[in-house]
């Protein structure tokens, strides 16, 4: 599960594990969106100058 979540959030998309059920696909879609937002916020915090 941790491997799948890491691959999903980082949008690598190896394709070796894929959800089969509708519920699983919806969960992965939400997890991907969350991951993209989280990584964007993280990169923004790194790029913002500190006082």
Image: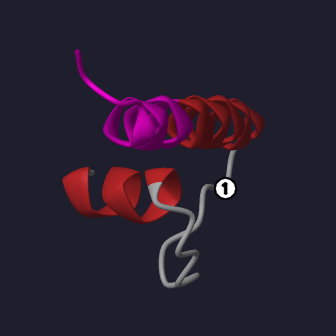
For the record, the magenta segment spans 38-51
**Viewer-side residue, 44 vs 15:** 44
Q: Secondary structure at mark 1?
A: loop
Q: Position of residue 10 (x, y in %)?
A: 46, 60
Q: Is residue 19 magenta?
A: no
- Number of numbered labels in the structure image: 1
Magenta stretch: helix, strand or loop mostly: helix
Query: Does 7 sit above or below residue 29?
Result: below
Q: Residue at x 48, y 29 (%)?
A: 41
Q: Position of residue 15 (x, y in %)?
A: 58, 81
Residue 25, by quadrant, is top right
Q: Residue at x 26, y 63 (%)?
A: 3
* In the image, farthest residue toward the top: 51
Residue 46, by quadrant, is top left
10 Å neighbourhood of mark 1: few (<14), some, or many (≥20)?
few
Query: Does 15 sit above or below residue 44?
Result: below
Residue assigned mark 1: 20
Q: Residue at x 56, y 29 (%)?
A: 34
Q: Quadrant of the C terminus?
A: top left
Query: Does 29 sit above or below residue 34?
Result: below
Q: Position of residue 24 (x, y in %)?
A: 62, 39
């Amino acid at each position: 599960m941790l491997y799948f979540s890491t691959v999903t959030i980082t949008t690598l998309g190896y394709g070796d594990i894929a959800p089969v059920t509708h519920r699983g696909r919806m969960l992965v879609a939400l997890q991907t969106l969350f991951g993209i937002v989280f990584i964007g916020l993280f990169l923004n915090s790194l790029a913002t100058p500190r006082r």
